[in-house]
Structures are given as structure tokens and as C-alpha cells.
Image (cartoon, rainbow, N blue to C red):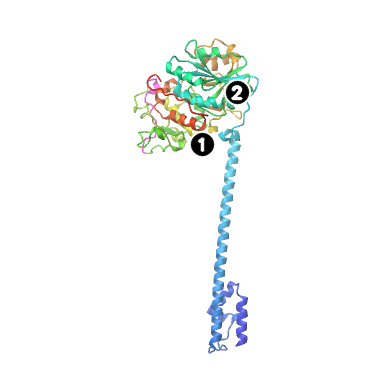
């Protein structure tokens, strides 16, 4: 009995860390496995102490092996989960890295807003911003961009000359207040009102003038440095213009480079929206309601008729309204106003407030998503030769010596300086498509554009990102503003 028990104990000890050993304690295995066979006939069942000892050891080893098996199973499961998690993490990291690499290769690092190059102002000549002035409500925004670009603040503009094209007393008082905010501002009162008269003040041979309209509501941080550098890099050009958002010529390209997004005017006033809620970020806008017909009715505005009353076809749906995004797709873009634009200086995009509004909402969206690169065209250098086509004179760099040599400038200075004189001299106007600026409206667009909330959105953008101090606000109200 003692020998059998001893062999049994040794057999149990040898299987302590074996699954087979656990199975061996099954009653059938204990009986059938020769290596564990216990002779029931030789076992003295009357020896209760021996039987109890044997049963206790059997129960102990069963529990011990069960615990070890459970622990090993949990450990194996944890290792599998860890491996799966690590694999997913590595796959995600690789995908993100590959996406960034492709994006950088396609667009170039300097094309994204946060990768703007570090500019160094060139020496040897003066750079003057020349503003065709008369509308304080826009200038209160433009002022922030100009001060940000002053040489005393690390920018390129040595001075800003305000050409007062107004006799409105309120506008002139506002201009006096404005020029007193910095020594870099100077006011000039023109001999007579009109586009042509200001050019008599832009004739210093060694000065580069950057003519800017007073309703420019956005100037990319690289726009003025790029214009200056391109003006130096292409001396044979007569002038170099910026890539204007809301121009009847460049918007045709913007619609095809993916810069213009599908937007439509909000059909009816929202119940819980106030002017205090306004933000420049387009991502805060709700989606255009799918239950509403998603198309814009131009009415008869394209035939040269005046803007219809509020709420009528072709007119704004209500005052201070928003434009809402549609899901981006070529099909949805065709339902929006930009689909009617053409490469025509006097086409519908020159008169339609709706085409202007859609472009501005698209610009705000692209600013928010750092997608300004979508406006770029003109090859690797981003330079577009206008081939003597007329282009808008809202934002252009030109040497004083070239103005002096071609005085007097005719009343239609845009035709003169972008087409006629360049063609006569065989010196074309170039557009630097990487110098992005936003032009609020042309005269025919003004009435409809003032019924949008866009001006408030551009004010919010300037105050958050651009203004160096408190904005010089225009508090004028009524018909004189």
C-alpha cells in the first residue's frame, strides 16, 4: 500500500504543471492510463486516513492546476489584445504619415497657412499702400490688416496713403481719426473725385505703390510680401495683381480648383440666432435643410434689372441672412450661383450679389480649414499672365516711375492699367495667385451683399486674428453711411 501511494504521489508531482496531468485525474483516466493506474483491489478502502490523504491531494492539485490554467489563459488573452492594439496603432500612424506626405508633395509645404515662409523686407526703395478711400464701414476692417503689414510692425508697408474720394463730412472725420492712430498713415484730398485723380500722387520713381480698394475685407498674411517679391522677380511686367476672391475672372478658376464650395441662402430666419451669436467660422453653420429645394433662383437680375424686393426670386430671403453649406459634390455645386459664372470681366459674376456671397462663405471656410492653397493656380510659381485681358484693379503693385511715364491716366483706370497700357508697351499684367485677398463687393453687388451677415463675420475674423489693438470702429447710422 505504501509503495502504491508513493508512486501515485510522484506521478501527481510530475504532472503538476501539465494539462495532461489535470486530465489524468478524471476518474476514467485514472483507471485507464497505465502510467497512473491504481489497483483498486490492492487499495485498502478500510484505511480511511490513507483515502482521505489521497482525496485531499487530488482536490488540491485540481484547484492548483485550474488556477494556473485560468491565469495562463488570461495572460495569453492580454497578449493577443496588446498585439492587436499595437498593430492598429502602427497602421493608423502609417496612414496618417502617408496622407501628410502625399499632401505635402502635392501642394508644397508653403501652400498651407501655417507653413507661411518667413519674409524679409527688401531694401533700397519705399513701399507705399495707396487706398482709394470713401467707405468707413469697410475701412474699419481693412485698417487692421494694413497696420499688421506696416514696416514698424514687421511688415512691408513703409507708409499708407489714404486718397479721399468723398465729400461726406462723416467719412472725412473718420479718416482724420484714423490717420491720427499711427504716423505711418497720411491723408490726401484729391483735386476732383474719380478713379483717375489719385494716380497723380503715385509718381515717385523709386517707390513701389500697392493700390488697394477700401472694401478689401481679407488680406492673407503673405499677400503683400508675395506681390512685392513677384514685382521684383518679373521686371518686364507692367504691374502685378493679387488673386482676388470675388472677381469675375479669378472666380472662374476658383470654382474649378475646388476653392468655391456649395452654399445657398438660408430659406427662412432661424428662431434662435441673433447678431451676438455671429462667428466667422463656417463650421458653426447648420447644414442647408434637405427638405427645401436646393437651387438658387436668379430671377431676372441677369438681364440687368434692379435687385427685386427682399424675399423675391433673385433677392436675399431676409435681412442679415446666412448662407448654409450643402454636402460637397459637383452635383450640388451646379445648383449654386457660382455655376452661372463665366470668364468675363462684365459678366454675371460682376453684378450678382449671390455669386459674391457664395465666394465669401467659401473663403471663410477655407481660412478655417487652412485650405487657402485651393486658390492657387498658374503652375509651380503661381504666376498667371493675363495676356492683356482686363483685370480688376482692387489690389495691384506698380512702380511710380511706370505711372509717371504714362500720365495722364484715363478715367477708366482699370482698363488703362491692366489692359491698354500693358498691351501698348508689351508688358503684361501678371497675377500672383498665391497672394490671396478678399474683395467685398462691386457696385452692382452692394445692395444684395449688405443684406447678408458677412460684414459681421469679417469683423469677427479681423478682431480675433489680425487687429493689433482696438479696432477703429465706424458708428455711423442712416443713409449717410
In the picture, residue 425 is in which quadrant? top right
The quadrant in which the C terminus is found is: top left
Give residue 54's mark: none
**Crowd around label 1: few <14 · some 14–19 · many ≥20 (10 Å):** some
Marks 1 and 2: CB-CB under 8 Å?
no
Dot 1: what SS?
loop
Per the image, the residue denoted by label 1 is: 369
Looking at the picture, tell me which residue is in the foreground, 272 or 440. Answer: 272
Instruction: Give the mark nearer the N terminus: 1 vs 2.
Output: 2
Looking at the picture, tell me which residue is in the foreground, 102 or 452. Answer: 452
Along the horizontal axis of the image, is 122 left or right of 179? Answer: right
Q: Is residue 298 magenta?
A: yes
Looking at the picture, tell me which residue is in the foreground, 313 or 358. Answer: 358
Give residue 228's mark: 2
The span from disc 1 to disc 2 (Cα, nearest Å) is: 27 Å
User: What range is drawn magenta here?
Assistant: 291-306
- Residue 127 horizontal/vertical position (percent): 59, 20
Residue at image coords 56%, 76%? 61
Along the horizontal axis of the image, is 133 left or right of 301? Answer: right
Image height check: is 186 above or below 112?
A: above
Image height check: is 287 above or below 29?
A: above
Q: Is residue 118 magenta?
A: no
- Residue 50 horizontal/vertical position (percent): 56, 86
Dot 2: what SS?
helix
Amino acid at each position: 500500500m505504501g509503495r502504491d501511494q508513493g508512486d501515485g504521489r510522484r506521478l501527481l508531482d510530475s504532472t503538476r504543471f501539465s494539462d495532461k496531468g489535470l486530465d489524468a485525474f478524471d476518474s476514467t483516466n485514472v483507471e485507464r492510463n497505465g502510467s497512473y493506474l491504481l489497483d483498486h483491489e490492492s487499495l485498502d478502502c478500510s484505511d480511511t486516513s490513507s483515502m482521505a490523504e489521497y482525496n485531499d491531494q487530488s482536490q488540491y492539485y485540481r484547484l492548483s492546476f485550474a488556477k494556473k490554467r485560468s491565469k495562463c489563459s488570461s495572460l495569453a488573452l492580454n497578449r493577443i489584445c496588446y498585439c492587436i492594439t499595437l498593430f492598429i496603432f502602427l497602421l493608423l500612424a502609417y496612414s496618417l504619415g502617408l496622407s501628410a506626405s502625399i499632401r505635402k508633395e502635392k501642394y508644397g509645404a508653403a501652400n498651407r497657412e501655417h507653413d507661411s515662409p518667413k519674409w524679409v523686407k527688401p531694401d533700397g526703395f519705399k513701399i507705399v499702400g495707396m487706398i482709394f478711400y470713401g467707405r468707413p464701414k469697410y475701412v474699419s476692417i481693412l485698417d487692421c490688416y494694413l497696420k499688421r503689414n506696416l514696416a514698424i510692425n514687421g511688415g512691408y508697408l513703409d507708409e499708407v496713403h489714404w486718397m479721399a474720394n468723398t465729400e461726406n463730412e462723416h467719412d472725412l472725420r473718420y479718416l482724420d481719426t484714423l490717420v491720427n492712430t499711427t504716423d505711418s498713415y497720411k491723408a490726401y484730398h484729391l483735386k476732383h473725385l474719380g478713379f483717375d485723380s489719385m494716380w497723380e500722387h503715385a509718381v515717385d520713381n523709386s517707390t513701389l505703390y500697392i493700390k488697394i480698394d477700401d472694401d478689401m475685407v481679407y488680406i492673407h498674411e503673405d499677400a503683400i510680401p508675395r506681390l512685392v517679391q513677384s514685382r521684383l522677380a518679373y521686371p518686364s511686367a507692367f504691374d502685378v495683381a493679387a488673386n482676388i476672391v470675388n472677381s469675375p475672372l479669378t472666380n472662374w478658376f476658383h470654382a474649378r480648383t475646388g476653392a468655391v464650395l456649395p452654399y445657398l441662402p438660408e430659406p427662412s430666419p432661424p428662431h434662435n440666432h441673433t447678431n451676438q451669436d455671429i462667428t466667422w467660422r463656417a463650421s458653426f453653420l447648420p447644414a442647408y435643410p434637405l427638405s427645401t429645394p436646393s437651387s438658387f433662383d436668379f430671377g431676372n437680375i441677369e438681364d440687368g434689372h434692379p435687385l427685386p424686393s427682399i424675399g423675391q426670386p433673385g433677392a436675399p430671403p431676409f435681412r442679415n441672412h446666412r448662407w448654409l453649406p450643402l454636402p460637397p459634390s459637383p452635383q450640388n455645386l451646379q445648383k449654386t450661383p457660382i455655376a452661372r459664372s463665366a470668364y468675363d470681366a462684365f459678366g454675371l459674376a460682376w453684378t450678382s450679389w449671390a455669386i459674391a456671397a457664395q465666394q465669401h462663405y467659401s473663403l471663410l471656410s477655407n481660412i478655417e480649414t487652412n485650405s487657402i492653397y485651393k486658390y492657387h493656380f498658374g503652375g509651380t510659381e503661381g504666376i498667371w499672365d493675363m495676356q492683356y485681358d482686363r483685370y480688376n484693379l482692387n489690389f495691384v503693385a506698380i512702380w511710380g516711375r511706370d505711372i509717371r511715364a504714362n500720365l495722364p491716366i484715363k478715367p477708366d483706370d482699370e482698363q488703362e492699367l491692366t489692359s491698354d497700357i500693358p498691351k501698348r508697351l508689351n508688358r503684361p499684367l501678371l497675377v500672383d495667385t498665391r497672394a490671396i485677398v478678399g474683395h467685398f463687393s462691386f457696385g452692382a453687388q452692394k445692395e444684395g451683399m449688405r443684406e447678408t451677415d458677412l460684414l459681421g463675420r469679417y469683423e469677427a475674423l479681423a478682431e480675433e486674428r489680425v487687429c493689433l489693438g482696438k479696432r477703429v470702429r465706424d458708428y455711423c447710422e442712416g443713409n449717410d453711411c
